[in-house]
Image (spheres, grey):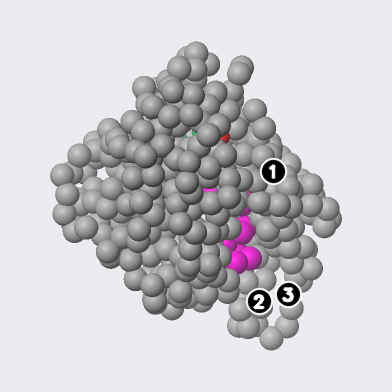
Amino acid sequence: MPEMSRRSVLTLGAALGLAGVAVPRAAWSWSPVGSVLGSGSGTDPQWVWDDDIDRIMANVIDTGQVPAVNAAIGSWVHNWQPLPSGLPPELAGFLQGSTAMPAWADMAKLRRAADFNRRKDTYLFLIYGLGGGIMSTVIPREAKSVYWSKGGADMQDRAAKTFSFGYDLSDINAFENSGQFKVTSNKTRMVHAAVRHLLPQSPYWKAVADETIPISNQDILVTFHSTGTFAHKKLKEWKVPMSSADEEAFLHSWQVALHFLGVRDEYIPATWAAAHSQAEQILTPKLAWTPEGQDLAEVLLGLTAQVDLGVTRGFLNVFVRYQLGNDIGDWLGLKRDYVSAATIRAGWPTYIAFREGLLPIAPVGFYMFDQLVRAIAMAFLNRGGSGTTTPITIPDINRPG
Ligand code: HEM
């Protein structure tokens, strides 16, 4: 993959609303002092994976126990449920600890985050679905891993499972006993561990990968910045009203989510300022086009266009350009439409102001934006078109080719 020049990193960063860094691919220098732990080794998280569960899942796969594990976790859905029986003792032992809330979790903040997610859900659907979702397709390591793993063969199903994660995290009861997030995130952690064992055995992935083991702690942080940090940036840029308690709570739900995904506490940013500074270092310089990402982008945009509310694919293309900038729009070959682009630039900020009660009269184009927001929300709530929760299961093979 060609390295980006300093200038292109800065232009791209500016388009995304993220500041670029002075030196592309600079060595890791983010200080653990800015983390929820407040201290740490300073080791580059690119070389940190999830050792205990990685070893356990590798053993589950190598000893042919994946079907038994999938059967056992099938009915394990809610946070209140005890661990299912029938798990290998080592795995059960691990999950016993990994489903516990971290000591620094604050339930009052998490409840506020749930309420915030509900109040701002339309913008969040749009930012995650069209912004973060499409940005993930120009994060080469993520796109290549997703494409060449088992789920890559059925992108629609794969997208539906990822929506489930976002849905469970945004749910009003996410971290309560009646919620599902602790279970969903632990299943995801197991899937990631399985993928770390499987993908290095794929000749297709090995031919295109620039790493030996996928999904490092740094990769997970990059995904957080392309979703959570990006959402924070866009909400601020679009002047969506948020109190500082709301902003803090929103970050907190992501902090706990990252912990549950196996990111070490020394890398989890304690504040939005620390998160943005980490994103500047590890997100923007990594963005690039790949054939795998192109394929993935087509599927994701197709999912939203399927919800027939008169939102055309052309309008979606332009809205993606509005959120992610023209560099990414050009990489993905998203058609330009100067009239729609001008309408969005002028109309979207006033649409938000009206929705937030800051404007007395509905602006021109209100209906069009409302339909866009509805279409995205439906694609999201309908879990990518499947209509039902697609259970997360452990893969035991890669994409066959
Ligand atoms: C699987 C979420 C980061 C690659 C999954 C699943 C979820 C998920 C919910 C289970 C759905 C499924 O089985 O398809 C997340 C979240 C992340 C994150 C919330 C970070 C905030 C990453 C990163 C990579 C990655 C950084 C790669 C660089 C994969 C792959 C699968 C997977 C390859 C398995 C697909 C399959 O074969 O079924 N992820 N993920 N994920 N994730 Fe992630």
Read off the residue under disc 3. Answer: 363
* Amino acid on which the number 2 mark rests in the picture: Arg
191 above or below 117? above
Circle 1 crowding by C-alpha within 10 Å: few under 14, some 14–19, many from 20: some
In the image, what residue occupies the spot 58% across and 71% down? Answer: 118
- Image location (x, y in percent) of residue 170: 54, 63
334 above or below 259? above
| Comes first in the chain, label 2 or label 1 | 1
Read off the residue under disc 2. Answer: 355
In the image, what residue occupies the spot 45% across and 75% down? Answer: 112
In the image, what residue occupies the spot 61% across and 78% down? Answer: 356
* Amino acid on which the number 3 mark rests in the picture: Pro
Q: Which mark is residue 13?
A: none
Mark 3: C-beta under 8 Å from nearest atom of ligand 1: no
Magenta segment: does it hold 122? yes
Q: Give the range drawn in magenta.
A: 121-133
Circle 2 crowding by C-alpha within 10 Å: few under 14, some 14–19, many from 20: some
Read off the residue under disc 1. Answer: 301
